[in-house]
Image: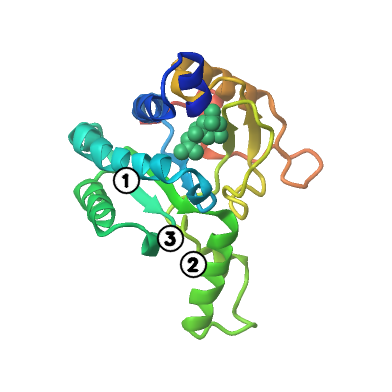
Amino acid sequence: MDGNGRWAKRRFMPRFFGHKQGVDALVRTVLACADRGIEYVTVFAFSSENWKRPTEEVSGLMGLVLVAVTKYLAKLVGQGVRIRIVGDRSQVSEKLRDAWQQAESSTSHNTRITLSVAFNYGGRWDIVQACRRAIEDGVSAHELDEAKLNSYMALSHAPDPDLFIRTGGEVRISNFLLWQAAYSELVFSDCLWPEFSDAELDAALAEFARRDRRFGAVNSNAPSALSNLANGAHGP
Ligand code: IPE
Ligand code: MG
């Protein structure tokens, strides 16, 4: 979800205003995904590197999470959204940890769509924490394979993403889902995140439908949940 700051700057507004609009765009997009039968959405909300931003912006973002939980949680519960937070919780305030706990527990029974919010997350952090926990569990070198390591990754509750969208015009992955995006179709959009719309989402899905996915093989277009949807098999 990139481009909040630039979106605000273009309107001669403080960056925080862009982040605020970014939360609205997130809620809108998650519901649009659910309407299209998409069952898993994962968003990059705050990276392990975002601590390098000015203190004022960092605390603004932390405060915004609390406001967002208060403002939108009931709506998301009602819309069948299950929320999971992925990332290193050890460095965030107790207040924030409590808000996440509340968001997760009050939506844990929902099954329509799973929204995973990556917060204080980094793809490399995830790989290292998974290795550490596997070692702590006494997993032997012989036992450790891709599936085993994946079971320790922060997104083990979700399938690998079929489609990876980055807004804001940059063409890089920036330490998001390094392990999970091995075979994701990448779509880069110049649209700034606060203005990400249903039309932008549909354009990305149409682009996805045009891709030929071979997963290393010569001609098998192996089916995935999203390719079934793209081919017209409608979800719930
Ligand atoms: C993305 O918007 C939101 C977060 C990383 C929290 P940016 O804040 O990166 O916006 P730009 O890139 O400065 O426009
Ligand atoms: Mg940015």
Q: CA distance from mark 1 to mark 3?
A: 16 Å
Q: Which mark is residue 83?
A: 1
Mark found first going from the N terminus, 1 or 3: 1
Query: Residue at label 2?
Result: 152
Nearer the observer: mark 1 or 3; the answer is: 3
Badge 1 or badge 2: first in the primary sequence: 1
| Quadrant holding the C terminus | top left
Residue at screen point 57% across, 28% down: 167
Query: In this orientation, does residue 228 appear?
Result: no
Q: Residue 127: x and y, percent?
A: 58, 64
Q: Earlier in the sequence, mark 3 or mark 2?
A: 3
Does 64 sit left or right of 177 as displayed?
Answer: left
> Could you tell me if the residues under marks 3 and 2 are in contact, i.e. CB atoms within 8 Å?
no
Horizontal and vertical percent position of residue 15: 44, 28
Q: Nearer the viewer, residue 115 or 88?
A: 88
Secondary structure under badge 3? loop
Q: Amino acid at mark 2?
A: Tyr
Residue at x 24% of width, y 31% of height = 79
Few, some or many residues within 10 Å of mark 2 (<14, 14–19, 20+):
some
The answer to whether 210 is drawn above or below residue 137 in the figure is above
Name the secondary structure under disc 2: loop
Q: Is residue 55 left or right of residue 225?
A: left
**Residue type, label 3:** Asp
Secondary element under disc 1, as helix, strand or loop, is strand
Disc 1 residue: CB within 8 Å of ligand 1: no
Marker count (numbered): 3
* Left or right: residue 19 compared with residue 78: right
For disc 3, the marked residue is 88
Label 1: how many residues lie within 10 Å, few (<14), some (14-19) or many (20+)? Answer: many
Among the 4 quarters of the image, the one containing residue 131? bottom right
On the image, which quarter does residue 124 sit in? bottom right
